[in-house]
């Protein structure tokens, strides 16, 4: 492969990364929003007109878990099948990873791997693209599995202490709900968050 071909592939990869980052950061860019976003905006406007319990209604936040929010989330919503399974896998990590950011990570790792194989290792474009796709899909998948497994191991290690804390609370005369709430306040993540 010539230097001009390498430069062309490198510039194409950089352009693709810039477009993906633009989708992540930019959102819709003026396109009409979906019904969920319109409904959320209507709720925000209605909440601004009222005050709830003496606090300004502007403090009410929507976490966005009900639907796609960024450009890549909308793209993933249209392209990916079985998103609920992927969302569950991402939730098991204990981190706020959206489907769109997971998709961006897959694309970014795939492009970076392809570019490194073509430019540095001087592999053919077809072989580099195939390996880039394999690493782009497999790398983030393995990373998410590893994060979920670490969180589960921490939960299993702390769970006996949480049960012991509940039992001690019940023996001392606390109600069941208060004992469970004490575990939520006093235990570290991930047990405290779950309780």
Image (tube, rainbow, N blue to C red):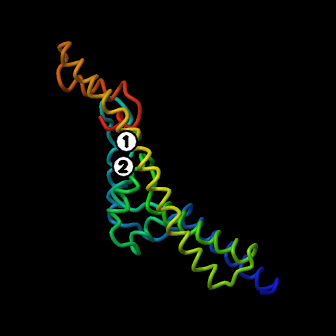
Q: Residues within 10 Å of mark 2 (few under 14, many from 20)?
A: some
Quick one: 38 or 162, which is closer to the camera? 162
User: Quick check: marks 1 and 2 in contact, CB under 8 Å?
Assistant: yes
Q: Is residue 90 above or below residue 5?
A: above
Image point (54%, 63%), residue name: 105
Q: Which residue is mark 2?
A: 44
Whether residue 28 sits left or right of residue 179 in the image: it is: right
Quick one: 93 or 120, which is closer to the camera? 120
> Tag on residue 33?
none
Q: Which quadrant would residue 41 be assigned to in this image?
A: bottom left
Residue 52 appears at what percent x and percent y? 30, 35
Q: Earlier in the sequence, mark 1 or mark 2?
A: 2
Q: Residues within 10 Å of mark 1 (few under 14, many from 20)?
A: few
In the rendered image, the quadrant that contains the N terminus is bottom right
Helix, strand or loop at mark 2 = helix
Q: Is residue 7 above or below residue 89?
A: below
Residue 50 appears at what percent x and percent y? 32, 40
Q: Is residue 136 above or below residue 180?
A: below
Nearer to us: label 1 or label 2:
1
In the rendered image, the quadrant that contains the C terminus is top left
Q: Which residue is mark 1?
A: 60
């Amino acid at each position: 492969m010539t230097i001009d071909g390498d430069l062309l592939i490198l510039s194409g990869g950089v352009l693709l990364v810039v477009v993906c980052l633009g989708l992540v950061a930019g959102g819709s860019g003026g396109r009409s929003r979906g019904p969920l976003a319109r409904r959320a905006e209507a709720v925000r406007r209605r909440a601004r007109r009222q005050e709830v319990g003496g606090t300004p209604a502007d403090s009410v936040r929507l976490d966005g878990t009900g639907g796609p929010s960024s450009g890549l989330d909308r793209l993933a919503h249209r392209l990916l099948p079985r998103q609920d399974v992927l969302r569950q896998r991402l939730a098991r990590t204990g981190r706020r990873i959206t489907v769109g950011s997971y998709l961006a990570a897959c694309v970014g790792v795939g492009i970076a791997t392809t570019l490194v194989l073509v430019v540095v290792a001087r592999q053919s474009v077809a072989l580099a693209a195939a390996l880039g796709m394999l690493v782009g899909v497999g790398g983030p998948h393995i990373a998410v599995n590893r994060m979920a497994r670490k969180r589960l191991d921490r939960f299993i290690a702390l769970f006996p202490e949480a049960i012991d804390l509940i039992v001690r609370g019940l023996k001392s005369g606390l109600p069941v709900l208060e004992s469970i709430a004490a575990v939520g306040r006093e235990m570290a993540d991930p047990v405290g968050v779950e309780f």
